[in-house]
Amino acid sequence: MDDLQTRRQRAMGRHVTTFYREPVHVVRGEGPWLWDANGRRYLDCYNNVPHVGHCHPKVVEAIAAQAATLNVHTRYMNERVVEYLEALFAKFDHGLSSAIMVCSGSEANDLALRFAQAVTGRTGLIGTDNTYHGNTAAVSQLNASKVPIGGYADHVRKVPAPDNLNPVGGSRDGQGAAFAAHVKAAIAELEASGHGVSALIVCPYFANEGFPTLERGFLDEAIAAVRAAGGLIIADEVQPGFGRLGSHWWGHEKLGFAPDIVTLGKPMANGHPVAAAVTRPEILEAFQESFKYFNTFGGNPVSAAAAHATLRVIEEEGIRENAESTGAYAVSLLCDLASRHDCIADVRGSGLFFGAELVEEGAPATALCDAVINEMRRRGVLLHSEGRHDNILKVRPPCVFSRENADLLVDTLDAALTAVRAAR
Ligand code: PMP
C-alpha cells in the first residue's frame, strides 16, 4: 500500500496543499492537542476552526443528537436555524439582524458582494493588495496571490494593506490617512471607469495581511469616503470573529466602526462547515428581491445545532475572556523572547491571535521563518507563517489555550530559533 501522502495526491491532485515538510497525519484531537497516527501529541497553535477546542463534548453531543433526530435541506421549516440566528444577532449592534446561512467563508463573502451590488446597483469593489477572502470566481478577484483564471477584472481596485514595519505612507502615525488616500484614489478610478463603488471589503483585523497593530478609528476616514461615494462596508470576520481577539467579540468593534455586512465562517461551528452573511434587513430585502437565493445545506438543522452549541460554549466557558488573558500572557512571553533573539523584529497581536515578525540584516527573514516552523513541528508544536513575505510567525490556537500551553509554545520557540540559527 502506498503511503497516505502519495494516495492523497493521486486522489486529490498533486498541488493539494499540505503544511510542513513532513506533513502531520492527524487522527485525533482534544482541546488544544492533536495526535498523529503514531500516538505522538502536538500542541496545536494554529487551528482557528476548533474555536472552543478540538472535539468539544458539548458540540459533538449537539451534532450527534440533531443528526439522530432530523436533518433536512433548508426549504423545510425547522426551529433550529431561527433559534440560532436570534441568539447570534444578540451579539451584534448596528441593526445587523438578518442573515443568510451558507457553508463556507467564501460563499459568505460571495453573498456579501452581491448584497452590496444589489443595494447600490454598482459593481466596483475595493480591498487590500495582500489579502484572501475566499475561492469563488467573484471573491477570487480580491485575492492577492491566488490569481483568478483569466486574471483580475477591471471592477476591483486593491489598496496597499496596512503594515507595522512598512506602514502605508511611511509612518505608523500617518498610516490611517495614507490608507484613506489610496481608498479615495480607488473610488475616483472606479467612478471614472463607470463601475462606481459598491463596497469596501476588509478583514477588520487584517489577519491575512499580517495583523498589523492599528489604532481604534484607523478606518474611519476611508469608510467615510466609501460611504460618501454610496458604497457599503463589508467586515470579513471569518478570522477575528467570535471573541478570538479577546477584548471584543468582533474585529469591527475593536477597530470601532459599523459595518453594513458582516461575514462569518471558520470558528462558527467549531469545525462543522457553517458560515453566514449578516446584514441589516433592508439590505437582505434588496438582495432577495433581485435574486431568489437558495442554499441546500446552509443552516440545516445539524449545522444550526453545531453553531448554537459553539455559541453557548463560548459564553459559558468564558472563551473570549480566556483569549484576552492568555493572549496577553503569551505576548508578554514573546516580548521577553524578542529581547534574547535579535531576529524578532516585532511582536504583536490581540487575544489569541498573535505572532512575531522575523527580520535579518534589515530584510524579511522568510527562509528562517520557514525553517523555524518546520523545526517547531519536529518538536511537537504546530504553527505557521503569514504576511507579504511569509516572515511572520502566526499563532492562532483553539481559544481554550492555557498559560501552560503558552509556556510550552514560547519555550519551544526559544529552542527552535536557537537550533535553526546554530545549524546555519
Ligand atoms: N475570509 C478570510 C479572511 C479567510 O481567511 C478565509 C479562509 N482562509 C476565507 C474568507 C474563506 O473561507 P473558506 O475557506 O471557509 O471558504
Image: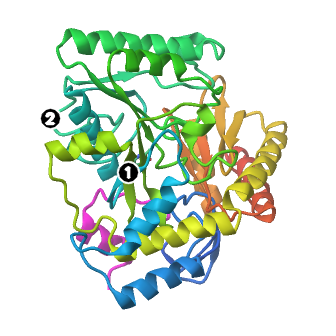
First of labels 2, 1 by sequence position = 1
Residue 328 is situated, as x and y percent measured from the top left of the image, at 78, 47
The vertical placement of 153 against 349, above or below, is above
Q: Position of residue 297 (x, y in %)?
A: 27, 68
Amino acid carrying mark 1 in the image: Ser
Secondary-structure class at tag 2: loop
Left or right: where does residue 71 sit relative to residue 424? left
**Residue 410, which numbered label?**
none
Q: Give the magenta part as a residue range.
A: 1-23
Rendered view: 105 above or below 51: above
Q: Which residue is mark 1?
A: 98
Helix, strand or loop for disc 1: strand
Residue 4 sits inside the magenta stretch: yes
Q: Which residue is mark 2?
A: 150
Which residue is depicted at the point 77% across and 62% down? 408
Label 2 sits on what residue type? Gly
Q: Which residue is rendered at x = 29% and y = 67% of the image? A: 9
In the image, the residue with mark 2 has its CB under 8 Å from the nearest atom of ligand 1: no
Q: Nearer the viewer, residue 89 or 370?
A: 89
Comparing marks 2 and 1, which lies closer to the viewer? Answer: 1
Residue at the spot 50% in from the left edge and 35% down from the top edge: 209
**Residue 380 appears in the rendering:** no
Q: Residue furthest bottom?
A: 68
The rendered magenta stretch, by its main secondary structure, is classed as: loop
Q: Quadrant of the N terminus?
A: bottom left
